[in-house]
Amino acid sequence: MAWTKKDPAQLTINPFTLIGKDWFLLSAGTPEDYNTMTCSWGALGELWGEPSVTAYVRSSRHTFGYLEKNGLFTVSVFPEGYRKALAFCGSHSGRDCDKAAETGLEPVGIDGTVTFAQARLVLVCEKVYAQDLSEALMTPEVRGTFYGSDAMHRMYIGRILAAYERT
């Protein structure tokens, strides 16, 4: 099977299912030097007349440094059979292990960045904006439930440059 490049506006996906239920891997770097993490928070839509992705990453995550130093990143969505691999990538740090070796995922280059051969949908994104979230955005309950003493998230907005679906 191969990927077919599509116009992002032609994708027939439910963003609530794709992000909140299916999860995705957020990756930055090259196949030789990258990190990836599982995300279940984010948004898909349009910003400044362009298709866009918004993802949230804590400064404590290893992927944070890769997002900071790279202008491109990918959002990769997988078939249901990869749920255990995504759970592993969300609960282990790339500082401590080789996530691809541990999960069997195969990193591959795509449009100057990295994704995984097993992905069913890949969005290649150019980072256009990043901003730390502010406590002013949240209620005390949200702050207590999602942060406690943990670092705040940085919001990354990416322009979707290309979309690829598995055919």
Image (cartoon, grey):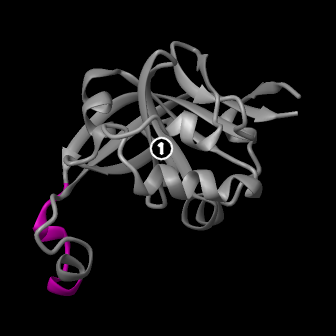
**Residue located at (57% from left, 14% from top):** 111
Instruction: Using the rendered image of the protein, determine whether residue 51 is visible from the camera's viewpoint.
Output: no
Q: Secondary structure at mark 1?
A: strand
**Residue located at (59% from left, 16% from top):** 109
**Residue located at (84% from left, 25% from top):** 2
Camera-side residue: 22 or 159? 22
Q: In the rendered view, does 165 fall on the left or right side of 129?
A: right
The image quarter in which residue 166 lies: top right
Q: Quadrant of the C terminus?
A: top right
Q: Quadrant of the N terminus?
A: top right
The residue carrying mark 1 is: 53
Query: Whole-percent x and y of residue 20?
Result: 55, 66
Q: In the rendered view, does 31 fall on the left or right side of 152?
A: right
Check if residue 140 falls in the magenta segment. Answer: yes
Query: Whole-percent x and y of residue 69?
Result: 26, 22
**Residue located at (68% from left, 60% from top):** 14
Above or below residue 60? Residue 17 is: below
Kind of residue indicated by mark 1? Val
- Stretch of the chain drawn in magenta: 133-141
Query: Whole-percent x and y of residue 36?
Result: 45, 38
Q: In the rendered view, does 92 fall on the left or right side of 24?
A: left
Query: Whole-percent x and y of residue 112?
Result: 51, 13
